[in-house]
């Protein structure tokens, strides 16, 4: 595996992912981790970043022979949205979260972030045209239960406490941030391989 690294709707009703179901998903009948199907899961707000940083990062990671997951690239018509996304998160080694101005308006983004944080993935935040202090759940209470909003706020706070990359589209170099992000992802994957080798 390490040589490969170096080679480089929400539906009509909200999904219920309570702690017991989540723990059952992670622990199942054995203590083994779920088999990694993806090296990295890219969490992003499509309307803000799909046509730029998210797709460029996906393409850069593919060119390094990694297995990234990006919804628009990995999902096909007929796939069940939450099932496919949840499985991709749980079977990815690391996650990149691209925070952007409209990120916190999205139930999907916040649900993905909460699952990423609950599953204790290594997270690489990219703050794109937004500062960590500007992030707060912007979903209306009619859309989500109080428990979900609390879960989303917790996940946001956890993510804001992680050192990340920043990008300002008015004065930044998109190619540079994508290259730096892909280098950081490779470093994290190598660290995980070393940790797994020492277990």
Image (cartoon, helix red, strand yellow):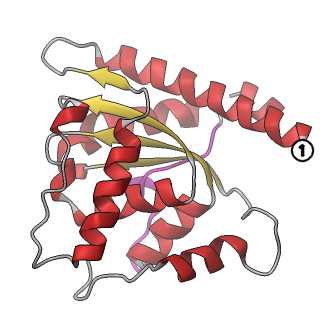
Residue 90 percent across, percent down from the top left: 59, 62
At x 48%, y 54%, the residue is: 117
Q: Quadrant of the N terminus?
A: top right
Compared to residue 123, the image places residue 126 above or below, namely above
Q: Is residue 149 left or right of residue 3?
A: left
Q: Secondary structure at mark 1?
A: loop
Q: How many numbered marks appear?
A: 1
Magenta run includes residue 3? no
- Can you see residue 41? yes
Q: Which residues are magenta?
A: 66-79
At x 27%, y 34%, the residue is: 52
Residue placed farthest to the right in the image?
198
Residue 136 percent across, percent down from the top left: 18, 49
**Picture quadrant of residue 149:** bottom left
Compared to residue 1, the image places residue 145 above or below, namely below
At x 66%, y 57%, the residue is: 37
Q: Is residue 190 left or right of residue 119?
A: right
**Picture quadrant of residue 194:** top right
Compared to residue 152, the image places residue 63 above or below, namely above
Residue 133 percent across, percent down from the top left: 20, 34
- Disc 1 crowd, CA 10 A, few/some/many (<14, 14-19, 20+): few
* Mark 1, residue position: 199
Residue 176 percent across, percent down from the top left: 38, 14
Q: Quadrant of the C terminus?
A: top right
At x 21%, y 29%, the residue is: 131
**Picture quadrant of residue 30:** bottom right
Q: Nearer the viewer, residue 139 or 57?
A: 139
Q: Is residue 91 left or right of residue 77?
A: right
- Can you see residue 109? no
Q: Is residue 176 left or right of residue 130?
A: right
């Amino acid at each position: 595996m390490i040589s490969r690294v170096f080679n480089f709707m929400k539906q009509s009703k909200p999904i219920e992912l309570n702690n017991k179901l989540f723990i059952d998903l992670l622990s199942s009948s054995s203590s083994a981790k779920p088999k990694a199907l993806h090296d990295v899961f890219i969490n992003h707000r499509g309307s803000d970043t799909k046509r730029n940083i998210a797709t460029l990062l996906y393409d850069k990671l593919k060119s390094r022979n990694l297995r990234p997951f990006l919804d628009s690239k990995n999902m096909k018509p007929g796939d069940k949205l939450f099932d496919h996304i949840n499985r991709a998160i749980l079977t990815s080694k690391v996650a990149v979260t691209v925070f952007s101005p409209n990120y916190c308006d999205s139930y999907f983004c916040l649900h993905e972030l909460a699952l990423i944080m609950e599953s204790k993935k290594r997270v690489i935040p990219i703050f794109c045209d937004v500062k960590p202090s500007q992030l707060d759940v912007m979903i209306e209470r009619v859309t989500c239960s109080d428990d979900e909003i609390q879960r989303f706020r917790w996940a946001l706070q956890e993510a804001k406490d992680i050192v990340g990359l920043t990008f300002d589209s008015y004065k930044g170099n998109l190619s540079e941030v994508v290259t730096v992000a892909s280098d950081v992802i490779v470093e994290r994957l190598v660290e995980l391989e070393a940790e797994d080798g020492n277990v």
